[in-house]
Amino acid sequence: MTNSTPPAEPSAPGGPPEAPPGVGASDFERWQARYSRTSAAGPPHDGGAPSPLLAAELGALPGGGRRALDLACGAGRHSVWLAGRGWRVTGVDFAPAGLARARDAAASLPTAARPRFVVGDLERWRPDDGGWDLVVLAYFHLPELLRRVPPWLAPGGRLLVLTHAPESPAGPANPRYRPTLAGLRASLDASGIALEYLRADTAGDPDVDLVTVVHARRPAPGAAEGAR
């Protein structure tokens, strides 16, 4: 796959990386600092084990060399977990410090199995090709991104979204990033994807109290629409 958003380059030899076009400097610096100072022993979403909810949702799916796209992959916990189960993974995030940690985490895998990590602003980034068998969007929500993703899937490809529910005491304060079930359903209905199920879940990540889970699939030609 060719990436349409090239990795950020240092502003000068040896200088700090710059924010990708479109990413606010304050957000970029905050996440860069977070990934630079935390370790695998820090908050679960900063690295280490995958979300228990994600593992439960996807653990039975065989990788078998199929392609997975991990959006807002951060320190790579889900990318590495999927790659270890035979998926060919590309992880995308705007924070080079997070991706550096992701590459370190992936070093335990055979070279050919390691994910490919790409710096990109998800407000604008898109892959140059489609045909993805799985797209994961965990704990990062943009309504417009959710509407853009379904055409990237192969027929029969799956979309898994985990996001902070509006009622959860964890997660971002901005309600834009804490969608309601009705808002998620509306975004998915507009995209034409077949929603298999949508629910709020109180069990899962130890640092997240209430999570909205979306499991959807791009219909294969001639297939019946998924359950609502």
Image (cartoon, rainbow, N blue to C red):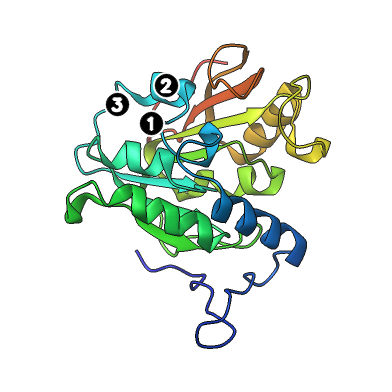
Residue 180 falls in image quadrant: top right
Residue placed furthest toward the bottom: 12
Image vertical order of residue 224 relative to residue 98, above or below: above
* Label of residue 16 in the image: none
- The residue that disc 1 covers is 222
What residue type is disc 3 on? Answer: Leu
Give the distance between the C-alpha atoms of the residues marked 3 and 1, in whole angstroms. 23 Å
Q: Where in the figure is residue 148, as x and y percent of width and height?
A: 59, 50
* Quarter of the picture holding the N terminus: bottom left
Image vertical order of residue 161 relative to residue 72, above or below: above
Give the distance between the C-alpha atoms of the residues marked 2 and 3, in whole angstroms. 8 Å
Task: Decide if residue 228 is on the left or right side of residue 115.
Answer: right
Q: Where in the figure is residue 91, as x and y percent of width and height?
A: 43, 52
What residue type is disc 1 on? Answer: Gly
Front residue of 164 and 215: 164
What residue type is disc 2 on? Answer: Glu
- The residue that disc 3 covers is 61
Q: Where in the figure is residue 184, as x and y percent of width and height?
A: 68, 30
